[in-house]
Image (cartoon, grey):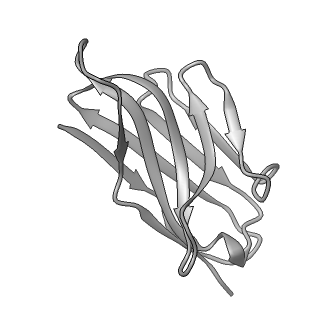
Amino acid sequence: QVQVVESGGGLVRPGGSLRLSCVASGSISDVYAMSWWRQAPGKSRELVASITNTGSENYVDSVRGRFTVSRDNAEKTVHLQMNKLKPEDTAVYYCNTYGREGMNGRPSYYWGQGTQVTVSS
């Protein structure tokens, strides 16, 4: 099985910073991309940032310039550095890993359980 675990969430004040981490482990082999999603109460889940195994990054317009996604050399760990946080950033943040199990596994999407980020004074 594949395990995807997020960490680093918490309560911060507007303008503050927070760093999220996500680690994919278990039977997963090749990782092609990892991404961060978030879901606020009453809203649908949206893609926040993503990074491929080649280092290509993508951001939703609302966080561009404030958030930075990065990965380690093993490409099974991804981080999301969040700066200048706003109350509207409050949501549960989920990590998604696109990869496969073993050499012949079929590529699939794997989700973490999420970590709560609350921006409030």
Q: Give the quadrant of residue 16.
A: bottom right
- Residue 112 at x, y percent in the picture: 35, 52
User: Up-down: is 62 above or below 95?
Assistant: below
Query: In the image, what residue occupies the spot 33% across and 45% down?
Result: 4
* Residue 28 left/right relative to 109: left
Q: Is 20 positioned to the left or the right of 108 in the image?
A: right
Residue 97 lies, in percent from the top left, at: 42, 38
Residue 56: x percent and y percent? 67, 26
- From this viewpoint, which residue is outermost toward the top? 103
The quadrant where residue 24 appears: top left
Pick the front one: 21 or 36: 36
Q: Is residue 80 left or right of residue 92?
A: right
From the viewer's perspective, is residue 37 above or below residue 121? Answer: above
* Of residues 115 and 103, the one drawn nearer to the viewer in this rendering: 103
Q: Which quadrant, please, contains the C terminus? A: bottom right
Single out the residue that lies furthest toward the left: 1
Q: Residue furthest bottom?
A: 121
**9 to 3, vertically: above or below:** below
Quadrant that contains the N terminus:
top left
Name which residue lies at 63% across and 46% down.
49
Residue in the picture at 25% in, 12% down: 103
Number of disc labels? 0
